[in-house]
Image: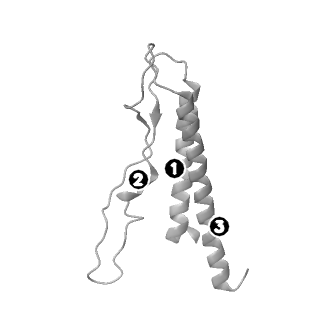
Amino acid sequence: MLEEIDLFRLSHAMARHAGARQAVVARNMAHADTPGYGARDIAPFAVHIEGDARFAPRATRPGHLNGSLTGPGFEPRIDRDAVRDPNGNSVALETEMLRGVEVKRQHDRALAIYRSGLSVLRAAIGRN
């Protein structure tokens, strides 16, 4: 039932994105000393939902425009802007720690959106 409500679908997708990005950050930190390893990252969540028809505006009456129909996945990509060490490794632990904090904030935001949606539903049915 809750999967049909866009707010819950959005918060679920945001939490999944945060989890996938946290896995990439952890993998980067594990390979901090691996020669030739390039730091990876996942595109920001906003990029992923831009082209996703599930989150695009939908026509509610004739004359409304529909969004685009395709969206990218959560595939990690090599961070081309990262500075490489002499051994070819581009992982900076400081950068990865900051990314980890950013991911935690995104996950917390997804949970807050979910909780807020539940509060609205409870208020709508007359429960606090």
Tell me if residue 25 comes above or below residue 48 in the rendering. above
Which structural element holds mark 3? helix
119 to the left or right of 32: right
- The residue lying toward the viewer, choosing from 35 and 4, is 35
Q: Amino acid at mark 1?
A: His
Q: Residue furthest bottom?
A: 126
Residue drawn at x 59%, y 58% is 109
Ranked by sequence position, the earlier of labels 1 and 2 is: 1
The spot of residue 74 in percent (x, y) is: 45, 45
Quadrant where the image shows the N terminus: bottom right
The spot of residue 106 in percent (x, y) is: 56, 52
The spot of residue 77 in percent (x, y) is: 40, 36
111 to the left or right of 73: right
Distance Cα–Cα, label 3 vs label 2: 23 Å
Which structural element holds mark 1? helix
Q: Within 10 angstroms of label 3, few (less than 14), some, or many (20 or more) residues? A: some
Image quadrant in which you'd find residue 67:
bottom left
- The residue lying toward the viewer, choosing from 66 and 101, is 101
Ranked by sequence position, the earlier of labels 3 and 2 is: 2
Q: Within 10 angstroms of label 2, few (less than 14), some, or many (20 or more) residues? A: some
The reply to whether the C-beta atoms of the residues labelled 3 and 2 are less than 8 Å apart is no
The reply to whether the C-beta atoms of the residues labelled 1 and 2 are less than 8 Å apart is yes
The spot of residue 34 in percent (x, y) is: 52, 18
Residue drawn at x 37%, y 58% is 50
Tell me if residue 59 comes above or below residue 78 in the rendering. below
Q: Which dot marks residue 17?
A: 1
Q: Mark 2 sits on what residue?
A: 48
Ranked by sequence position, the earlier of labels 1 and 3 is: 1
78 to the left or right of 68: right
**Number of marks:** 3
Q: Amino acid at mark 2?
A: His
Tell me if residue 23 comes above or below residue 67 in the rendering. above
